[in-house]
Image (spheres, helix red, strand yellow):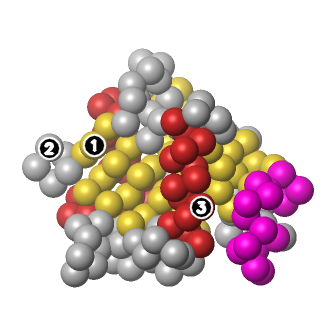
Amino acid sequence: MSTIKANQENKHVLQDSTRIVISPINQNSTSNSYIDYNEQLERMANNKQLMWDDTKFNKQIKGGLFIFCKNRTKLYNGSVHIHIVEEVYPPSERLPTWSNNVGQGDRNVLFISTKSVEYDWDKWINMGGPKKVQGTAHIIKNKKNIIDHINNDMELMKIGGDSELMKIGGDSG
């Protein structure tokens, strides 16, 4: 069952029950997450399906949110990219290139939207997003606040519509 519903004006609205999975992207070019993320960017450039691992609990569902998180560091400003989960498949659908990620072979595969919304780090923190993400996890703390912010921006982002990537920062959001 989808956690996105259309309201009277035919706009998508995330429900409070929407599940949110977040996964950090390490900025070290030799890390698995960096390599896999860049593979997904190449897939997107080639009009192929974007996909990523679920958490170890495999509880994400179609219509949930998936967030790539680039933590703020001394060298990087940090940002998050929010996608819609389009489908959930069993671990048998994992990409062969993911075999190097030892210990994650039992995770479901999330097919995610190619369209996304990017929030800068300051906006993300103001929404109540975690200040540091380590490992793929479900967001529980401040989830309602995050969903409320996304719903307020839904008119702009049209993540389920025809727009491309929308950047929402501290100055514009």
Front residue of 91/124: it is: 91
Q: Is residue 37 above or below residue 154?
A: below
Q: Amino acid at mark 1?
A: Lys
**Residue linked to disc 3:** 36
Image spot of residue 110 (x, y percent):
69, 52
**Residue linked to disc 1:** 167
**Residue linked to disc 2:** 172
Q: Residues within 10 Å of mark 2 (few under 14, many from 20)?
A: few
Q: Residue furthest right?
A: 92
Image spot of residue 139 (x, y percent):
52, 68
Question: Which of labels 1 and 2 is toward the front?
Answer: 1
Mark 2 or 3, nearer chain start: 3
Q: Amino acid at mark 2?
A: Ser
Alpha-carbon span between mark 2 and mark 3: 31 Å
Image spot of residue 1 (x, y percent):
73, 41
User: Does the stretch in magenta take in 101?
Assistant: yes
Q: Residue drawn at (84%, 70%), measured in percent from left and top?
A: 106
